[in-house]
Image (cartoon, helix red, strand yellow):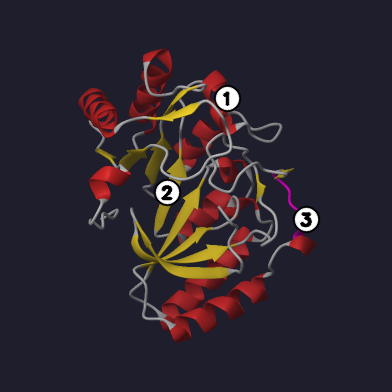
Amino acid sequence: MPLQKGIIYGPVNSRRLGVSLGINLSPTKRKVCSFNCVYCQYGTTRSLTMSPARAKLPGVQDVEHALRKALSEVESPRFITFSGNGEPTIHPDFPEIAKVVRKVRDELSPGSEIALLSNSSGLLIPGVSEAIDNLIDLPIMKLDAGDEDTFQAIARPAPGITLERIIQGMRELRRPFALQSLFVSGKVNNSEGPALKAWIARIGEIRPKTVQIYSLDRPFPTKGLMIVPPERLDEIASRTNRETGVEVKAYSVKREKGENPSWS
């Protein structure tokens, strides 16, 4: 899919957030991310890093100006969401940008909530967890695997990122957070066997506020991946809830046709 072309995009009608105004902290001409996920809708990560160059990213004032302009032109969205062309929390000024976004939200769209869609790698960066705890209304963290081998096979992260470090970061978050997890089968399979058992164990260990699971529904760059059907997603959700007591909701394109599910 084509990259977002500006700092602000939308509003979009998100399957999990309803009407959401997106904030893109990555460049508009290339994907900059800490993961190179096998299923990413934006294709292969050419700039795989935890430390992108500040000069190539939008600045704090750029984000503030773009958000003020957007909120003056559109009806207040349900969510203002950090997402975009890569991982937002690896922006070196993410804590300051989150503070500015909250200030603008309070002034121009107090009914909107601030959400974050994150692959969770930013929890390894000093200051990011504090910003999430204090400035983000709805943190939505990603966890696609419960064991290191499956994590490395799916996320293909930048050097130094391990599942255990991410799990530790999740444990240290004070604000309740949601998890989203994408299940695939085929060349990489996290939807059954020991990989699924390990993921369920992590859910019981972390105990997020809620978990939403889904499978492929957009173009992806890796051959040999297969969609996990809705019936299997339902089975995973039921089993996880039964074994952990955590609320798990399964989403699929087929099921959601004509619906507008959200995180509430």
The x, y position of residue 204, in whole percent, is 33, 27
Q: Nearer the viewer, residue 263 or 221?
A: 221
Dividing the picture into quadrants, the one containing residue 247 is top left
Is tag 1's residue or tag 3's residue first in the polypeptide sequence? 3
Q: CA distance from mark 1 to mark 3?
A: 27 Å
Label 3 secondary element: loop
Q: Residues within 10 Å of mark 2 (few under 14, many from 20)?
A: many
Label disc, if present, on residue 21 of the rendered structure? none
Q: Quadrant of residue 61?
A: bottom right
Cα distance between the residues tagged 3 and 2: 25 Å
| Tag shown at residue 140 | 2
Rendered position, 41 above or below 64:
above
Viewer-proximal residue among 251 and 181: 251
Q: Which residue is mark 1?
A: 153
Q: Which residue is mark 3?
A: 53
Seen in the image, is 129 located left or right of residue 79? Answer: right
Q: Amino acid at mark 1?
A: Ala
Comparing 109 with 254, the one in front is: 254
Span colored in magenta: 50-54
Residue at the image point whose x is 26% and y is 49% from the top? 256
Between discs 3 and 2, the one toward the N terminus: 3
